[in-house]
Amino acid sequence: MFKQLLARAREARAAELEGESGFEGGFTLIELMVVLLIIAILLAIAIPTFLGVTGSAKDRAAQSSLTNVLTESVATYQNNQSFPASSTITNYSSADPQFAWVDGSASTGACTAGANSAKCVSVTPVDVQAASDAQGVVLAVLSSTGTCWWAVNLQANPPSTLLTTTTDTTGVPFQSTAVTTAGTFYAQMPSTSTNYNSGKNCYAAYATTGGFKWGDSYSSAGVN
């Protein structure tokens, strides 16, 4: 009887020791390498997707700002049936002071990366059918992704022959072979573009040249 009990005790103890050695054994090197490989694959898939979503959200924020200031600009047009061609920045700043408005009739009015880049709006009135008619406005904003976005609103149909002269001291002639009717059109310039010039070309009047590409929505915005 005593021998049987002793044998059973030894078997139980042996089973306990075997279980403990199993827990203490841990993972093998191969198992760890497989886990690390799986993690690396998941990261390789997830990181580009995350960056793409983040970049898209930043562009959407810039587009939202551009839409808001465009709406404000058109509302300003309704008052005088022309876009402000004098004291342009004063007019827009008083109407919507949350944005940092800059005179976009020249490259000095570019929106570049900096403290106010998220709120910077480059604006210039443009002449559409005749000098000094100020029947259009061009706006530019810079996304946190580095992409510059433009919007133009024309209240008159451009002439079949490009308007190339203006007597307006602040406006510029709107020239485009891609826009033939009145309306609102959109354009973009990613930071990878050869025209980007470190963001120095992200100003309103840069988009008034004849060769600039436009689209009728943000999704179809011309890439320049």
Image: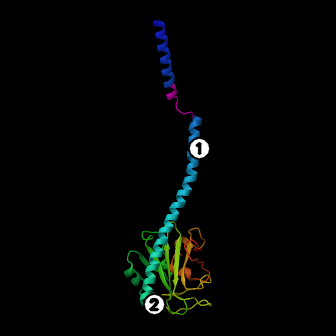
Residue at numbered disc 2: 81
Q: Which residues are magenta?
A: 21-28
**Residue at image coords 47%, 75%:** 67
Residue pointed to by mark 1: 37
Work out whether 76 lies above or below 65: below
Q: Which amino acid, by three-letter code, is at mark 1? A: Leu
Q: Which mark is residue 96?
A: none
Residue 59, percent from left and from top: 51, 68
The amino acid type found where label 2 is placed reads Gln
The picture places residue 160, in percent across and down from the top left corner, at: 62, 90
Which circle's residue, 1 or 2, is located before the other in the chain?
Answer: 1
Q: Residues within 10 Å of mark 1 (few under 14, many from 20)?
A: few
The label nearer to you, 1 versus 2, is 2
Asked if residue 11 lies in the magenta stretch, the reply is no
- Alpha carbons under labels 1 and 2: distance apart: 65 Å
In-front residue for pair 32/158: 158
Q: Quadrant of residue 38?
A: top right
